[in-house]
Image: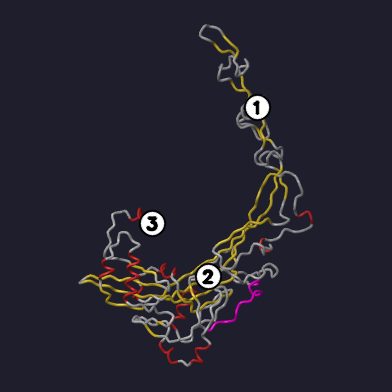
Amino acid sequence: MEQPLLSVEARGKKDEGWRSYQHVGRSASVHVPSLAAVGEEVSVNEIRAAPIFSESVYPTSIYGAVVSSPESYNHQDQVIVSKPDYGRDPQGYATNEFGRQILDEVEIRHLLINHVGHHFCWGSRPARTWKIVSIEDCNVYVGTLETFIEERETIRAIEPYSGGEVDGKNKGESELAVWELDLRSEFPLLFVPYKETSIKIPHSEALEKCTGCEGRGEIACPTCNAGQEAGHYKPNQMSQCSACHGRGLIAHQDGSDSICKKCNGTGKLPCVTCGSRGLIKCQACGGQGSLLTRNAAFVRWRTLSTRKVAASSGAASVPDEVFHKARGVQLYNTQAYQCTPAFFADSFHLNRFSSEVIAERSPIPAAARVICERHVISVVPVTRVTMANHNRSFSFYIIGFTREIYIRDYPSSFCWGLCCCFEWLKR
């Protein structure tokens, strides 16, 4: 038998006991002391020096005030919990005043007819005429763990040297390590999906002799000096004229000859690649003979997400992606270096659900460091409606506060392969 995530005993608690559970909606990027007993809010200085998943500590001079982020979880609402009147749905899961959807049959049928009207191959008769036989609340709990990480790696860049000052170690300053670079101007808001940048590492430049031309700036022509040993070439290599076949004269039908205009009577042509010089400019160094090498830092910021759904049997047939996109209410929202499971004083099962989400934390790459984590538990209101006509029946779901409809098997569907065309015309 399924157990409720929030126990019924919550009804008997005094108002004073619930006063500490109430919270005001705040930005999703900061700590929210909602329905669970959690710790202190993370400070800016603590995030600067966060050593999570790394033995070395971040340099305290690198990161500024990074505790600000966009509403990356903007599909969830935060509210003031004013009435902690928890009940239990038929499947044993908790329901409450902000989690229930109060819908009458007229409104339910209107939502269904409107949804069916957006599908060209669906008939409206079942939505209009079939009888509603049951309306069931089966709320769903969604848990997420977002891990915001930073990855840095060193990339060696090579380009032709065209003159100028070289920013190398000869100035008496050592090359900075990749994690010593100051990237405050590039640091994104917390929990952005992805951002990358590349920056030159100071004092890492050096001059090297081009290995392709041995510093000469030129290499043997691959057309007229093919097969020559490295560093050797033969100038003035000519090829036979294809117009006169090396004769220098063009024969005519009347028996006369004329000087070949293509080779000017020489019977030979210079190399089309190098003009018979035997040498061409080295493409690797641009003819300079030297290469400028430098180290660059390639930096990526990204958010790793772990998502989990706890649904009653009544909503088990709905894909998890539907609930992740739905709009619900946050019961718990905390941010820390490394989040720990939530603690609900009156719900062992909700605590266990939070622990399962934390246990499935995304693996951290070896070259990455964790900046911050955010753990959110939300409840999404779900209403299951069953309609029947004689011995036939079907069920659909009304999900979230936007009241999205999900139907798996609609009984009146007629498709002749034209759905894609209709969808294209609807745009």
- Residue occupying the point 52% across, 70% down: 146
| Magenta stretch prevailing secondary structure | loop
Query: In the drawing, does residue 305 fall left or right of residue 153?
Result: left
Check disc 2 and report the residue beneath it: 146
Alpha-carbon span between mark 3 and mark 1: 63 Å
Where residue 118 sits: x, y (%)? 35, 62
Number of other residues with Cα within 10 Å of mark 2, as a class: few under 14, some 14 to 19, many 20 or more: many
241 relative position to 317: left or right = right
Please identify, in this view, whether the residue under mark 2 or under mark 3 is nearer the observer.
3
Disc 3 to disc 1: CB gap under 8 Å: no
Residue 302 location, x and y as percent? 56, 64
Foreground mark, 2 or 1, reads: 2
Q: In the rendered structure, which segment of residues is drawn in magenta?
A: 37-49
Q: Please indicate, yes or no, whether residue 355 appears anywhere in the rendered image.
A: no
Whole-angstrom CA distance, mark 2 to mark 3, is 36 Å
Label 2 or label 1, whichever comes before in sequence order: 2
Residue at disc 3, secondary structure: helix
Q: Is residue 34 visible?
A: yes
Secondary structure beneath dot 2 equals strand
Placement of 221 over or under 19, stated as above or below? above
